[in-house]
């Protein structure tokens, strides 16, 4: 029996109310507990991006002096002293100075545990490039401090930090000098979390520690820090310390713009778009300041001026701008459904104090609704997103932090990973709650690419807020064996934190998009049941998570016919070229200490072999390195085929109700990217290399796709479409014998109607009839391929359906695969040739960065052209030298 169980160490129940001990032992920020840490709000991102903090240009206005660059860094007893870059962290500073190896190399996550257990101090002197007496207000601003620290300037304590995700601003007007000494004295996050836990004696906050297989640190749920930095089932334990974001001195007179955001609304009663602009100011002095604010969007012929009065201290003003009705507003659409149109907007603040501040931003217009309403023929409620009034099937994956060390995550890395998501026809990412609040550039790129996400209200890409990841399920299913008599304590804490605090704050701050308290959830049904449903995995409501590693993944009947699949997946190993960088020769075996150490999911390596064994022969080579490479290849083939089967099941379930289940409107597999080089559920390896799964995703998320499945000996093919209009197409079904490149028989079914944004049956035939029609075919000797072809070049990818396990396939022959490589402008063309049908053909060019147009495919013709898109300069010679061609018949 398949169980809908957690994939991994999930978010724990919420923690206690704040109770103070002493400074090291106080629960800062109001509340502690797993809910705060392991379940930072999730986001559903539609791939695309927007405006954030104010970067004001001002004549005679505020000045900013950056404190980025080289700082002095020392450990607790002064035995280690070095220069450390800011933004940065201790680990990367030690590595850059050659004092430690790459933290990701071999077993260094355990070897370098001492770094996180020490208490480090960052310090530097600075001279302000301005006359400090000239300014009424001088602030020292930290965009991000990781995590527990005491901040001092000129030996005066300014304050303490205990939240990695907060921005901290300290007023240093009265203490700044011509030469200043600033210090950030860190306390080990591991020690702090342990002390917090020790102080909280009222009741336990599970899980106290991660499973031993994760080699992690304990009590992560007692600190507002990236939860996976204490380890996860796909990542190492590196509880970093450092100034991980920008730090600067801000000076101003009279007033300063601290924060700026804009949110679009469509007002149905007036049939008009509006923009809500929120600006937060700090006004120096005891008197209000009056002035004018002008908002100008030239392309929409919209300009409005407002009279405003700013009160002393920090406060906000909200302006409502009505877009000119005579202008045609182009909406922002998710990837695959239209353009990501944005409009340049200038907001000018001219106050009586004499100087003006100009804010340049981009305005996007789109509406989002989470539709939960009765479904004909089914109990429960729907759960789908309407964007700009159009129901959208959500296709994508789950995002985790791109590195254990955030200072290594550059714009280029984010662009590469997010562009790879868009290139695989994804339109959404679920930003997992145990990582970090991603940098503004992440959301800017998502806005640009049309990727919907779950954060940050100025961004059209953000379509949903979720209070936590898996906490409703953790309590409902009692993952942590809490005695029944004690449950009420945890339920009360859960509701207080996620509903009475987080939900109320989010809905007050952002009325433009929906909020759910947890994911998975039963949505409105969970609300009805007091915010904790009895079964958050009920397929008739909300979203579900589903993991099953023991049943045969080719069997579509094991998958839940859910309303929305927001997590599901299978593991694989990354390419040998990725592993090679962090290992040595004795590690290159599937059963080596290294391979066991790198696997953070209990029995994960064995589960992969078990799943492979359902359909493929396991490698038997006597050459240990070849056997390791063959096993890696098979894990990727298995993962790709498993997630293909499950995703196609969710896609063909979108338009039907069977036994009260169906209308599936979302498929987000776990997970998109990797945090390090290790086996995981990711489709993109650390560094961005595409696994075979990501190439498969390009096809199984295609806007137009025929999908096949068998039921009781009958083959069904559905036409699945995300296109906005119906299309008359031809379905081509081709049956091949494994032993020949010549098709055994071909069927062309004309005038097939593929309905817009639907999944409809377009073909049905019993397998026995099909085999009889195609003489000389048996289940074991033949394979089916099929595609949809329409007018004007409209064509689906070619899909396949296996009639038996490939370990039982009869007639497979040596392929003698070869490739010639040539350059055409900025791309490289690989012409592949084979003498026999080749299943799961893999092209691998080692460490050369780039991706192919197709990979892992079933090659049924003598010749196939594949394009390589390089991400860095390379050459024909380099590619030829690095190329490895593998198909299933090469695995012995």
Image: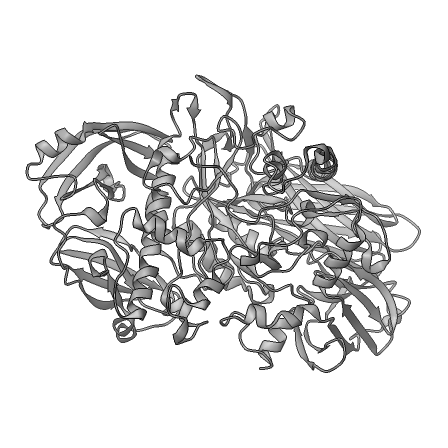
In which quadrant of the rendered view does residue 236 lie?
bottom right
Q: Position of residue 472 (x, y in %)?
A: 62, 36
Name of the residue lying farthest toward the top: 377
Q: How many marks?
A: 0
Q: Is residue 621 left or right of residue 861?
A: right
- Position of residue 260 relative to residue 592, above or below, is above
Q: Residue at x 43, y 36 (%)?
A: 2
Q: Is residue 525 left or right of residue 559?
A: right
Give how far across and how far down residue 370 sits, in percent: 55, 31
* Colouring convention used in this rendered image of the protein: one colour
Of 87 and 294, nearer the camera is 87
Q: Is residue 368 left or right of residue 656?
A: right
Q: Is residue 220 left or right of residue 760?
A: right
Question: Where is 628 relative to 777, above or below?
Answer: below
Residue in the image at 10% along x and 50% along y: 739
Quadrant into which the N terminus falls: top left
Is residue 194 in sight in this rendering?
Answer: yes
Which one is in front, 649 or 50? 649
Vertical placement of residue 859 versus 268, above or below: below
Q: Position of residue 691 (x, y in %)?
A: 37, 57
Q: Quadrant of residue 745?
A: top left
Q: Quadrant of residue 305?
A: top right
Percent position of residue 629, x then y: 32, 65
Please state, as top left, top right, bottom left or bottom right, where the C terminus lies in the image: bottom left
- Res 755 visible: no
Residue at the right extreme, as displayed: 286
Q: Is residue 442 above or below residue 251?
A: above
Q: Nearer the viewer, residue 758 or 681?
A: 681
């Amino acid at each position: 029996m398949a169980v809908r169980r957690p994939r991994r160490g999930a978010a724990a129940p919420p923690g206690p109310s704040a109770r103070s001990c002493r400074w090291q032992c106080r629960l800062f920020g109001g509340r502690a507990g797993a809910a705060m840490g392991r379940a930072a709000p999730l986001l559903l991102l539609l791939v695309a991006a927007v405006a954030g903090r104010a970067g004001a240009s001002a004549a005679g206005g505020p000045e900013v002096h950056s404190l980025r660059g080289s700082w002095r860094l020392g450990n607790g007893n002064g035995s280690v002293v070095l220069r450390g870059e800011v933004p940065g962290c201790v680990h990367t500073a030690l590595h850059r100075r050659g004092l430690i190896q790459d933290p990701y190399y071999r077993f260094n996550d355990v070897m370098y545990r001492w770094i996180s257990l020490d208490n480090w101090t960052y310090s530097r002197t600075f001279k302000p490039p301005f006359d400090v007496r000239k300014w009424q207000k001088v602030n020292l601003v930290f965009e991000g401090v990781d995590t527990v620290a005491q901040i001092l300037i000129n030996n005066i304590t300014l304050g303490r930090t205990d939240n990695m995700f907060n921005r901290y601003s300290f007023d240093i007007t009265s203490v700044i000098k011509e030469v200043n000494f600033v210090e950030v004295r860190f306390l080990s996050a591991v020690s702090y979390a342990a002390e917090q836990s020790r102080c909280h004696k009222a009741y336990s906050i599970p899980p106290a520690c991660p499973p031993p297989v994760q080699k992690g640190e304990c009590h992560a749920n007692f600190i507002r820090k990236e939860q996976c930095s204490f380890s996860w089932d796909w990542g190492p334990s590196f509880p970093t310390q450092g100034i991980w974001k920008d730090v600067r001195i801000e000076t101003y007179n009279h007033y300063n713009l601290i924060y700026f955001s804009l949110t679009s609304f469509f007002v149905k009663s007036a049939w008009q778009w509006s923009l809500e602009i929120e600006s937060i100011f700090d006004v120096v002095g005891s008197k209000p300041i009056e002035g004018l604010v002008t908002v100008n969007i030239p392309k929409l012929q919209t300009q409005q001026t407002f009279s405003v009065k700013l009160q002393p201290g920090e406060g906000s003003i909200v302006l409502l701008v009505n877009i000119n009705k005579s202008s045609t507003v182009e909406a922002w659409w998710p990837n695959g459904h239209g353009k990501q149109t944005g409009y340049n907007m200038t907001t000018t603040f001219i106050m009586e104090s004499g100087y003006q501040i100009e804010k340049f931003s981009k305005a996007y217009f789109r509406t989002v609704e989470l539709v939960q309403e009765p479904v004909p023929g089914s109990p429960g409620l729907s759960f789908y997103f309407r964007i700009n009034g159009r129901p959208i099937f959500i296709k994508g994956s789950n995002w985790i932090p791109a590195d254990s060390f955030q200072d290594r995550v550059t714009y280029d890395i984010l662009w590469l990973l997010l562009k790879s998501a868009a290139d695989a026809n994804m339109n959404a990412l679920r930003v997992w709650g145990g990582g970090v609040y991603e940098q503004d550039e992440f959301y800017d790129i998502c806005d640009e690419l049309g990727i919907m996400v779950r954060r940050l209200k100025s961004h059209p890409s953000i379509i949903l807020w979720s209070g936590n990841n898996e906490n409703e399920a953790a309590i409902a299913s009692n993952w942590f064996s809490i005695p029944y008599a004690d449950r009420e304590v945890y339920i009360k804490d859960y509701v207080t934190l996620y509903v009475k605090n987080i939900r109320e704050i989010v809905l007050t701050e952002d009325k433009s998009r929906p909020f759910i308290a947890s994911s998975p959830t039963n949505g409105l049904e969970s609300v009805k049941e007091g915010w904790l449903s009895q079964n958050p995995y009920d397929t008739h409501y909300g979203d579900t998570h589903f993991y099953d590693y023991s049943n045969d993944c080719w069997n579509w009947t094991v998958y839940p016919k859910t309303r929305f699949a927001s997590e599901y997946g299978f593991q694989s190993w990354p390419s040998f070229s990725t592993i090679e960088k962090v290992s040595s020769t004795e590690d290159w075996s599937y059963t080596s200490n290294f391979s066991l150490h790198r696997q953070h999911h209990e029995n994960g390596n064995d589960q992969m072999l078990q799943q492979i064994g359902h359909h493929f022969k396991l490698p038997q080579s006597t050459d240990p390195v070849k056997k390791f490479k063959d096993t890696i290849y098979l894990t990727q083939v298995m993962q790709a085929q498993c997630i293909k089967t499950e995703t196609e099941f969710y896609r063909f379930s979108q338009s039907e109700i069977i036994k009260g289940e169906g209308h599936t409107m979302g498929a987000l597999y776990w997970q998109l990217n990797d945090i390090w080089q290790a086996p995981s559920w990711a489709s993109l390896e650390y560094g961005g290399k595409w696994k075979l799964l990501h190439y498969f995703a390009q096809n199984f998320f295609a806007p137009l796709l025929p999908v096949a499945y068998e039921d009781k000996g009958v083959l069904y093919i559905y036409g699945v479409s995300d296109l906005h209009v119906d299309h008359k197409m031809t379905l081509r079904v081709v049956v091949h014998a494994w032993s020949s490149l010549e098709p055994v028989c071909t069927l062309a079914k004309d005038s097939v109607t593929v309905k817009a944004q639907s999944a409809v049956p377009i073909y049905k035939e019993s397998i026995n009839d099909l085999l009889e029609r195609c003489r000389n075919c048996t289940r074991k000797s033949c394979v089916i391929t099929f595609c949809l072809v329409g007018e004007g070049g409209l064509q689906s990818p070619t899909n396949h359906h296996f009639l038996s396990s490939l370990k039982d396939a009869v007639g497979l022959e040596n392929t003698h695969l070869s490739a010639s490589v040539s350059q055409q402008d900025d791309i490289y063309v690989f012409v592949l040739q084979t003498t026999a049908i080749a299943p799961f053909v893999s092209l691998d060019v080692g460490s050369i960065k780039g991706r192919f147009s197709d990979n892992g495919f079933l090659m049924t013709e003598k010749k196939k052209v594949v394009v390589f898109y390089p991400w860095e300069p390379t050459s024909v010679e380099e590619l030829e030298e690095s190329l490895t061609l593998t198909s299933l018949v090469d695995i012995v």
